[in-house]
Image (cartoon, rainbow, N blue to C red):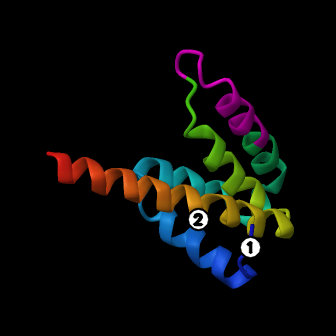
Amino acid sequence: MKFPSAEEAERWIVEHEKKLPHRLRRILDWLRAPRRRWLRIPVAVLLMLGGVFSFLPILGIWMLPVGALLLSQDIPWFKRATAAAMIPIQAAWNRWRARRVRKS
């Protein structure tokens, strides 16, 4: 898996944050403030754990990428790894949606 550069990873993250619901985007912006690192890291870990247990009610797979994006702010190499993992997932999602639209 080819890792994107740090700039490409940051651009991808910012581009996809804009697609989030307004309320979630505001919360993430608040958490991404540099002085909230003490809160951001535990929240990111909890979100990722919640994503692993997405088979339970209320928890969902959506929690995994959101937690990874939060954690990537504090661990530079993790940002590139997160983007490298998310880019093919995004491409697969786009292909699936395009096929679904064609069938309709």
Q: Residue at x 74, y 73 (%)?
A: 2
Q: What range is drawn magenta here?
A: 45-58
Q: Nearer the viewer, residue 84 or 20?
A: 84
Q: Was residue 57 drawn as part of the magenta stretch in this picture?
A: yes
Residue 103 covered by magenta stretch: no
In terms of secondary structure, where does tag 1 sit?
Answer: loop
Q: Quadrant of the C terminus?
A: top left
Q: Earlier in the sequence, mark 2 or mark 1?
A: 1
Residue indicated by mark 1: 2
| 16, above or below 22, in the image | below
Residue 84 lies, with reference to residue 57, above or below; the image says: below
Amino acid type at mark 1: Lys
Furthest residue to the left? 104
**In the image, 100: left or right of 24?**
left
> Residue at (58%, 78%) from the top-left corner?
11
> Mark 2 against mark 1, which lies toward the viewer?
1
Q: CA distance from mark 2 to mark 1?
A: 10 Å
Task: Indicate the quadrant containing the N terminus: top left, top right, bottom left or bottom right.
Answer: bottom right
Q: Which mark is residue 87?
A: 2
What residue sits 57% from the left and 72% below the top? Answer: 12
For mark 1, does the 10 Å Cα neighbourhood hold few (<14), some (14 to 19), or many (20 or more) residues? few
Residue 77, image quadrant? bottom right
